[in-house]
């Protein structure tokens, strides 16, 4: 376990000892960062060719949501979930959002992800209620997170396979064509 802090939008050890541990990380080993203040977004790192890199653009984007001075704990990841699975899923969602750019419910990757999670029943809970004054009925759905912290590998794998198949069906293309056209990584989940 290594203590890391965000300083000037870079991740560094919280002191000399932690920085030394950070520099001595094994090559091609992945690590998960968790914030000491919140655990809603996980960040995956890998050390490759002596440099620490984000696993994906999503991981880099997630660090932007944390302020400078945020402290993280880095723990080795068991390497059971492929970052390529997540990258494939995110690139398919981006491709679909570009295809559905005229539809306000599907015109961003985030909206596509949420709709896919709902369609695939990848939800934590839902609440159905009626406003007693207006009679208006509302359904509130809280979808699951695909973060390494909040979702195990088997659930994520099953969801990603189901979502990619559903998206191919929506776009009326084969899964292979969807993966090729999405300009993402083409590793399929197992």
Image (cartoon, helix red, strand yellow):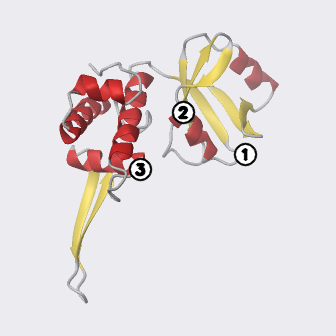
Q: Earlier in the sequence, mark 3 or mark 1?
A: 1
Task: Report whether 94 appears left or right of 166.
Answer: right
Q: Earlier in the sequence, mark 2 or mark 3?
A: 2
Q: Quadrant of residue 81?
A: top left
Q: Quadrant of residue 109?
A: top left
Q: Are marks 2 and 1 in contact (CB under 8 Å)?
A: no
Establish if 153 lies above or below 69: above
Residue drawn at 64 percent across, 14 percent down? 25
Task: Report whether 150 appears left or right of 115.
Answer: right
Q: Nearer the viewer, residue 59 or 186?
A: 186
Of the two numbered discs 2 and 3 in the rendering, the one whose residue sits closer to the viewer: 3
Name the secondary structure under disc 2: helix
User: How far is disc 3 from disc 1 in space, using C-alphas?
Assistant: 28 Å
Question: Can you see residue 28?
Answer: yes
The residue furthest bottom is: 133
Q: Position of residue 125 (x, y in %)?
A: 27, 55
Find disc 1 in the rendering and name its residue.
68
Task: Report whether 90 appears left or right of 45.
Answer: left
In the picture, the quarter occupied by the N terminus is top right
The image shows a total of numbered marks equal to 3
Q: Nearer the viewer, residue 97 or 154?
A: 97
Residue drawn at 37 percent across, 38 percent down? 95
Residue drawn at 29 percent across, 29 percent down? 178
Find disc 3 in the rendering and name its residue.
108
User: How far is disc 2 from disc 1 in space, using C-alphas?
Assistant: 19 Å
Q: Earlier in the sequence, mark 2 or mark 1?
A: 2
Q: Position of residue 145 (x, y in %)?
A: 38, 43
Find disc 2 in the rendering and name its residue.
57
Of the two numbered discs 2 and 1 in the rendering, the one whose residue sits closer to the viewer: 2
């Amino acid at each position: 376990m290594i203590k890391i802090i965000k300083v000037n939008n870079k991740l560094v050890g919280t002191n000399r000892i932690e920085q030394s541990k950070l520099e001595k990380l094994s090559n091609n080993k992945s690590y998960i960062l968790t914030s000491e203040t919140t655990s809603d977004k996980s960040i995956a790192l890998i050390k490759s060719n002596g440099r620490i890199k984000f696993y994906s653009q999503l991981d880099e984007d997630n660090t932007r949501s944390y302020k400078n001075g945020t402290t993280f704990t880095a723990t080795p990841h068991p390497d059971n979930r492929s970052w390529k699975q997540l990258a494939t899923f995110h690139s398919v969602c981006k491709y679909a959002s570009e295809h559905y750019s005229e539809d306000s419910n599907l015109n961003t990757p985030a909206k596509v992800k949420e709709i896919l999670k709902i369609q695939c029943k990848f939800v934590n809970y839902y609440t159905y209620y009626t406003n007693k004054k207006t009679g208006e009925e509302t359904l509130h759905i809280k979808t699951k997170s695909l973060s390494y912290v909040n979702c195990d590998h088997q659930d994520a794998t099953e969801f990603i396979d189901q979502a990619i198949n559903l998206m191919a069906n929506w776009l009326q293309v084969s899964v292979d064509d969807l993966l090729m056209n999405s300009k993402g990584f083409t590793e399929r989940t197992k």
